[in-house]
Amino acid sequence: MEAQLKNIKIEKSKTTKINEVDFDNLAFGSVYSDHMLVCDYKNGAWETPEIMPYQPITLDPAAKIFHYGQSIFEGMKAYKDSSGATWLFRPKNNHKRLNISARRLAIPEIPEEIFMEGLTTLLRLEKDWIPSNPGSSLYIRPFILASGNGFHASPADEYKFIICCAPSGAYFSGKVKVLIEEKYSRSANGGVGYAKAGGNYAGQFYPTQLAVKKGYNQVIWTDDNTHEYIEEAGAMNIFIRINDTLITGPTSDRILDGITRKSILEIAEDEGIQTEVRKITVTEVVRAAKSGALKEMFGAGTAAVVSPISTFGHKGVDYDLPELQDNFASLLKKRITDIQYNRAEDKFGWRYKV
Amino acid sequence: MEAQLKNIKIEKSKTTKINEVDFDNLAFGSVYSDHMLVCDYKNGAWETPEIMPYQPITLDPAAKIFHYGQSIFEGMKAYKDSSGATWLFRPKNNHKRLNISARRLAIPEIPEEIFMEGLTTLLRLEKDWIPSNPGSSLYIRPFILASGNGFHASPADEYKFIICCAPSGAYFSGKVKVLIEEKYSRSANGGVGYAKAGGNYAGQFYPTQLAVKKGYNQVIWTDDNTHEYIEEAGAMNIFIRINDTLITGPTSDRILDGITRKSILEIAEDEGIQTEVRKITVTEVVRAAKSGALKEMFGAGTAAVVSPISTFGHKGVDYDLPELQDNFASLLKKRITDIQYNRAEDKFGWRYKV
Ligand SMILES: Cc1ncc(COP(=O)(O)O)c(C=O)c1O
Ligand SMILES: Cc1ncc(COP(=O)(O)O)c(C=O)c1O
């Protein structure tokens, strides 16, 4: 490995903030580790990445990130096993998806070597920042922002690829109450919904605030045309269990192709659970809730892992989900986290040793 | 006026860059004046604005602007008349729209006093930066970015409101060739298309690049569901003249409520031109092009003023527009710029003296 690292410059921090952090009471993504990776794109090429002390970024006020939302990101986690080894989960999928996002946002793609070597070199340096408490992990945020300047609405000529790390606890505490959205939407046909583009998230804040005011935690996004097709749960993909079938919508240009989603589908099949990837309507879900056929709903994503939904609201009515003993959510969450934390065999080959 | 200014702190630049600028060959939005206004939002309130030398902005790598595209902006111009006086065009409309954008993006609204006094105080200081060459003006970019930190997808707790100025020439040089979009789209029903949200623009870059590769300057956006309704022309509203009627689409949650658009409508009515604000389909425009009833198409916006379209492409066919002697575009452009530059009476009360 050493040979490949020669291209990354490393400037170590002279001090550490690690003693200020209460690892037993970690929030999500609000404290940051000692180092970060920065790689600049200039004159048509990505330069040599640098690992440096975590520090502010200085940009011209005309930098396009401030005006045109030209930015993309990824969300990953590093897991520590009982022997102290560090693991990633399907990291090359995040690299691939970052480049899919890059193409749609007219951002230059990042080579796999820079992404993977930058990431693993940074993680080796930040080893002590990976929490070992159950349910905690080191949340990793790779992102690219448009640093080039100009008030002309066109792509920037310079970019920054950055990786930061945040030791984190659970995203949600407890079960999630969701509201099926009937007015607002997060993505258009032919839009950028399938990309992890910054602007997709800012657009969700206000409708989510409205839902929170009504007592919900999260919005279930539906299609912008009819609000009849169930698409995503905030920043998670969504699974719905009707009787013993586990259903999730197909990915499209409106829906993020989640790595947790596709892993959950494979694990479910491996468990002998019947799965269906097909469009699912609000009408069908409401009908199933009324008849008792609706057994479970849960969100799936890197940050929130598998998040069971306790209640969904639609057109002013709240529908509570049953509390099943043998629920799919717990089983699938255990299987995926056992792989992530190296507590079980990984027959799929998803674990990646740092 | 002095009394009202006491709240703005001013730190003047010790040097000026004005002598480095070639005012006879100005591009659009690529050189910036000596000062900028910065106003911070912290602890639930906007603080005292400060005018300071134009300088870089320093933010934590976890600032939400870098991750979730939480930013909005406005675009305005300051015009210099032959006596050297400075004018704005309907500036309170920009303030109102900035706050409409703010609400949708879960950004705190900015009080009118901060916006208007900040703007006029800055412009008085930057008076010499307002070009007097015909067609040139000082482009003004007020914007708000999320400066608060966190990897949790939720609104920031801190923001920066900034105004920068860029002496600018024409946005387009010459007539514009446009492509009617059939695959990509810029906004969803229930989305953020009606807001000047940063992310709306980044999403347009890639489809626009594809159009540019095919020889067009700009994309005509259509609705995301059928691609049959004509919505906007890049970052301009669009007008279509069929026979002697001037048509533009109604605003909606997908379309920016342009100040140029509504001014053009009023001027056209004042000129006795028949106007219609109604949905307009691609089919109708193509049919009119074939029959010869299509006389003109033009974009309208602050940056590009009135931009005549020479050709539109649709499904692989290019349709050229006629070159009319008595065209509406030239007439309307002359009327609106005569008001903006104080060359004619302003019966509408749109001009605003700085
Ligand atoms: C919109 C959206 N959907 C789904 C997901 C889940 O994707 P993944 O499982 O790859 O984390 C995320 C977040 O990562 C997301 O932002
Ligand atoms: C998407 C979009 N449409 C239309 C316009 C025109 O609006 P206005 O005339 O207020 O500048 C703009 C730019 O300002 C814009 O960004």
Image (spheres, coloured by chain):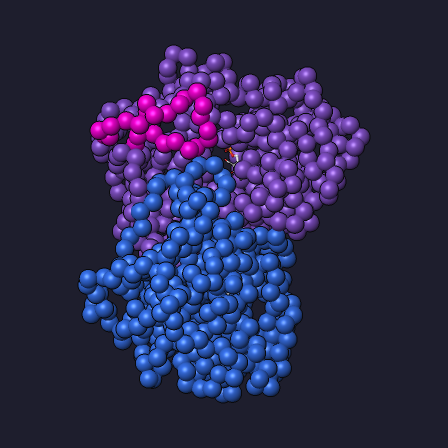
Chain colours: A blue, B purple
Question: Does residue A140 lie above or below B168 as drawn?
Answer: below
* Left or right position of A67 against A267: left
Quarter of the image with the C terminus of chain B is top left
* Left or right position of B256 against B243: left
Question: Does residue B143 lie above or below B297 as drawn?
Answer: below
What is the x, y in percent for residue B113? 32, 34
- Farthest residue, direction front: A3
**Residue A79 image-quadrant placement:** bottom left
What is the x, y in percent for residue B84? 37, 15
- Farthest residue, direction right: B291
Which residue shows up at 26% across the image and 34% down it? B52
Please give the range of residues in magenta.
Answer: B12-35
Quarter of the image with the N terminus of chain B is top left
Q: Nearer the viewer, residue A263 or A83?
A: A83
Q: Nearer the viewer, residue B349 or B237?
A: B237
Which residue shows up at 40% across the image and 55% down it? A161
The reply to whether the magenta stretch includes residue B14 is yes
Which residue shows up at 44% across the image and 37% down it? A151
What is the x, y in percent for residue B234? 57, 39
Question: Does residue A135 lie above or below A58 as drawn?
Answer: below
- Farthest residue, direction top: B83
Which residue shows up at 56% across the image and 86% down it? A271
Total number of numbered labels? 0
**Residue A9 image-quadrant placement:** bottom left
Tell me if I can see residue A269 in this picture. Answer: yes
* Left or right position of B324 against A233: right
What is the x, y in percent for residue A3? 37, 68
Q: Nearer the viewer, residue A279 or A13?
A: A13
Tell me if I can see residue B351 in this picture. Answer: no
Magenta stretch, main secondary structure, is loop
